[in-house]
Image (spheres, rainbow, N blue to C red):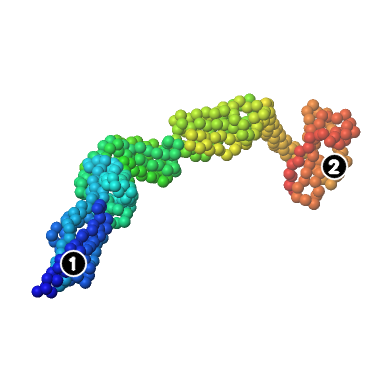
Amino acid sequence: MLLWSLLVIFAAVTEQADLLTLVAPSSVFEGDSIVLKCQGVENWKIQKMTYHKDNKELSVFKKVSDFLIQSAVLSDSGNYFCSTKGNIFLWDKRSNIVKIKVQELFQHPVLTASSFQPIEGGPVSLKCETQLSPQRLDVQLQFCFFRENQVLGSRWSSSPELQIPAMWSEDTGSYWCEAETVTHRIRKQSLQSQIHVQRIPISNVSLETRAPGGQVTEGQKLILLCSVTAGTGNVTFSWYREATGTSLGMKTQHSLSAELEIPAVKESDAGKYYCRADNGHESIQSKVVNIPVRIPVSRPVLTLRSPGAQTAVGDLLELHCEALRGSPPILYRFYREDVTLGNSSAPSGGGASFNLSLTAEHSGNYSCEADNGLGAQHSEAVPVSISGPDGHRRDLMTAGVLWGLFGVLVFIGVALLLYSLFHKISGESSATNEPRGDCRQNPQEFTYSSPIPKMEELQPVYVNVGSVDVDVVYSQVWSIQQPESSANIRTLLENKDSQVIYSSVKKS
């Protein structure tokens, strides 16, 4: 009986000495570590130690141990205590209750947008808004934005804002954001927000031309610019030639304009053009635009025109310059030895002329130049030689004199022919009626056998001059007045200026 009493007294003293106390942090924020300590008991006195929250067991240990919450969350708030189950020396014990309230480190983020119904093609600014606890303003956060489970931007960023340059119809959907601490302990997500992108129909379609120098020139580049003043989304642009109606090209892009390039324009490309634009609502056509193609001038040809075959001082020389190709108006310039003489314009194309009154100094090389603003072209040089002031008249006089002399010579020839024929006929008649002298006599020794009778008219006399060894006898015939003596006859026969007629006479 005494022993039992001693045991009871011992147990009471021990229980009084081993009161359990639960030790916990006084202030807890999300992400903090929570360490619960159950104090006031030794290991050899217990069989197990249990931690409780809101009267529910959290963890059971076979020895004295601490309870750790690695990263506190709001749901970890509650009433905590610990208990032990004693051995034969200790009855069961229970600690005091500790109320723990986990404070919010930062609020749940809220996604805001510059517009939840943006116009297609326009920008949108997204913002993930939250606020840190005043007692933890030193905590660093990072943010991330999502659309339909797809990450936007460069994933996590220290900036709570995201700029989207342009929103398109396919960007319509659910958006949200997340915020978390840099240590990745706490992450919170905003509510989802719906963004609906509004599409605007096409309007005011126009076609413009862009060319070097502001004018379409053969061989150069031409750009056809099709544009709209309003319209969103993917716009399909197409270009047409009115004469054929066939499509020249097509482009689809997120833009209010598009270009079609013709690398080298041809003369046949001149005509009327238009374009169309369509973003899915309706295809709109532009006005028809007439596109003329200007042709650079070809190399001109210089032609000289003068009154006569040769140019002379005082003549009016016409210089005609013409380029076979080239858009009007064309300006022609005329040169002599690269010195400008003057210019002339052809407003409707073709050639132009320049008149020049010639002087002796105008000899030289002449050329011309054609220019219609698309590049000047120079002709080949044409030489011009100018004679003196009376040269042309002198040539005409010389030709007249030559023709006159030729006529006189023809007349003399005809007269001599008729005269010779007349004397031939007279000679034949006299040879038949009168005896012929000895044909062997020397014609220089001619004598009469009998005195020459006195006669009022001239009498023909024949003398053989040919050789007897040939078939032809030549005779000299003189027509003389009756001489007074034989000496006068010989003198007349020896006169070199006497007329001599040769006649062919066959031998008998």
Q: Is residue 468 above or below residue 460?
A: below
Q: Residue at x 14, y 71 (%)?
A: 6
Viewer-proximal residue among 215 and 501: 215
Asked whether, in this view, residue 296 is left or right of residue 119, the answer is: right
Viewer-proximal residue among 81 and 173: 81
Viewer-proximal residue among 475 and 1: 1
Q: Amino acid at mark 2?
A: Pro
| Mark 2 or 1, nearer chain start | 1
Read off the residue under disc 2.
443
Q: Residues within 10 Å of mark 1 (few under 14, many from 20)?
A: some
Q: Residue at x 90, y 33 (%)?
A: 487
Q: Residue at x 57, y 28 (%)?
A: 342
Q: Is residue 497 above or below residue 33?
A: above
Q: In the displayed image of the protein, which residue is found farthest to the front?
A: 2
CB of mark 2 within 8 Å of CB of mark 1? no
Read off the residue under disc 1.
14
Asked whether, in this view, residue 482 is left or right of residue 7, the answer is: right
SS of the residue under disc 2: helix
Q: In the displayed image of the protein, which residue is found farthest to the right?
A: 487
Which percent across, then down, holds residue 346? Answer: 48, 30
- The alpha-carbon separation of the residues under discs 2 and 1 comes to 209 Å
Which percent across, then down, holds residue 62? Answer: 20, 70
Rendered-image quadrant of the N terminus: bottom left
